[in-house]
């Protein structure tokens, strides 16, 4: 029975590590692409495409 708890704890730890890794990847991507987003979206006149882009993101 204690082996089941150890397996569950190991699985929970792996899920936590994967969640942290994905969160880091998302923040890295956001930080990497934000300057281009400012150049291409925020400094241009509003169009339907830019509104749709901001609605999706």
Image: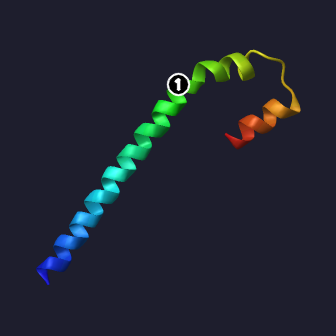
Location of the C terminus (image quadrant):
top right
Residue 18 placement, left or right of 36: left
Decide: is 21 above or below 45: below
- Count residues near mark 1 (Cα–Cα under 10 Å), then give few for <14, some for 14-19, many for 20+: few
Instruction: Please name the residue shown 53% across and 25% down the image.
Output: 32
Q: How is the image coloured?
A: rainbow
Residue shown at 84%/24% (left/top)? 46
Give the percent coordinates (x, y) of residue 56. 71, 43
Residue depicted at x 66% and y 23%:
37
Q: Hey, which quadrant is residue 14 in on the image? A: bottom left
User: The N terminus is located in which quarter?
Assistant: bottom left
Q: Position of residue 5 (x, y in %)?
A: 18, 75
Residue 39, located in which quarter of the rendered image? top right
Residue position for label 1: 32
The residue at the far right in this view is 48
* Furthest residue in direction bottom, as rendered: 1
Seen in the image, is 32 located left or right of residue 52?
left
Helix, strand or loop at mark 1: helix
Percent coordinates x, y for residue 38 in the rendering: 66, 19
Q: Would you place residue 4 above or below residue 42 in this image?
A: below
């Amino acid at each position: 029975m204690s082996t089941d708890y150890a397996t569950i704890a190991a699985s929970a730890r792996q899920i936590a590590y994967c969640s942290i890794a994905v969160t880091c990847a998302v923040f890295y991507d956001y930080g990497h692409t934000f300057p281009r987003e400012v150049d291409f979206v925020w400094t241009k006149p509003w169009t339907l495409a830019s509104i749709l882009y901001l609605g999706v993101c």
